[in-house]
Amino acid sequence: MPFPPPPSTPPSVAATDAAAVPARLEWNLEAGGAKCLDGPSLARAVEQRWKRRVFEPTRVPEIVVRGRIGPAPDAGWSARIELFDANGAALGSRELTTRAVECSALDDSVALAVGLMLDVTRHRVAEERAQHAVSAPDRSSLDGEAIDIPEGTAPARERLHFEPSASFEAAFGVLPELAPGFRPALALDFARWFRLEVAANFYASETAASALKGTTVSLWTVELRQCPLFESARRIGWAVCLVEQAGPLRARGFGFDTDANPREVFAAAGVSGELRFRLAGPLELLAGASVELPFVRYRFVYSTAAEGTLAVYRGAPIGGRAWLGVGARF
């Protein structure tokens, strides 16, 4: 004996009815959150995710989504999402936080949370319509503890960052002695794509002497660093780079019958590494080091009848630098 077919689901609770429930989005960027996810972008993200019209500003809303996003009280970023019915009764809330460097690390999570909360509520409103229920919907699945988004979450919106810095450095193998110097630099950092840095190196003059004769050597260079390996989205960033530098190398002899002042072009290439520690806001502390090979090892010599040709100074076959400074990331 055949069994009767099970009762069909009332069409009033189908997805199409839930989709017909009008909603409105009220989204605010808090002070300091100008680069966070704005209202129109959030609305587009939710509607693209669900592939349907969600927010209908021309209709009287039955659900209101209110939220705000901006800097967290301690550090990082936070977003709070609240749902209300047409009478202003609270239907549920969620809070999302992250200590990621970029506020856009919250973009995908906020859009997903709004979409899920709204989808659940719209179906319940549709069910209440069909059943003519007067009780408020169960809110337990909408309320909950704050959701912490991992600090290492990549920014959803990539943008070009500028990182100026100023460092004190020391160089060896280039000048006769360990040479102190000053290093201003500007890095261009397009997160997850490339990092390029241009710097200048100004070194204090150093002297190489034998008895009362010798030479004073001075140098400044322009430096280019290309970094194929780097991480800049976290609180501790790092970079491994190829480095080239070149500049005028000058020597001034003293104590000779005739003092010469030769000028040469110094050039070297090698590898470097750098660590950056985010302190507060855009401020960073940085430390780096490099190892480089000069293309030419210059010698500064003099000649005497008794001793022949003697070298006052000759560049080392390998050189290196270390620097420590402060910078900012914009």
Image: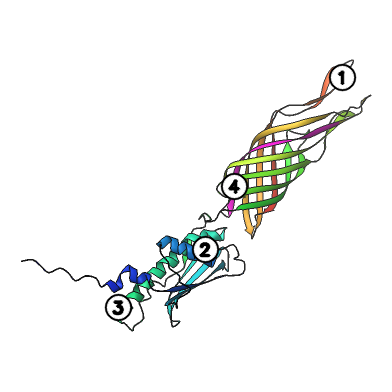
Q: Spatial distance from mark 2 to mark 4, Cα to Cα? A: 32 Å
Could you tell me which residue is drawn at 77 percent across and 31 percent down? 265
Given the image, on which type of amino acid does mark 4 rest? Answer: Trp
For marks 2 and 3 on the same chain, the one whose residue lies earlier in the sequence: 2
Q: Which mark is residue 238?
A: 4
The reply, left or right, for residue 158 in relation to residue 224 is left
Which amino acid type is shown beneath numbered disc 2? Ser
Q: Earlier in the sequence, mark 3 or mark 1?
A: 3
- Which type of secondary structure does the marked residue at label 2 adopt? helix
3D distance between C-alphas at marks 2 and 3 = 33 Å
For marks 1 and 4 on the same chain, the one whose residue lies earlier in the sequence: 4
Q: How far, Cα to Cα, is label 1 from label 4?
A: 49 Å
Q: Mark 2: give few (<14), some (14-19) or many (20+) Cα within 10 Å.
A: few
Labels 2 and 4: the sequence-earlier one: 2
Q: Residues within 10 Å of mark 3 (few under 14, many from 20)?
A: some
Check disc 3 and report the residue beneath it: 130
The residue that appears at 34% across and 83% down in the rendered structure is 135
Please tell me whether residue 42 is drawn above or below residue 158 in the rendered image: below
For the record, the magenta segment spans 230-251
Instruction: Give amino acid for label 3.
Output: Ala
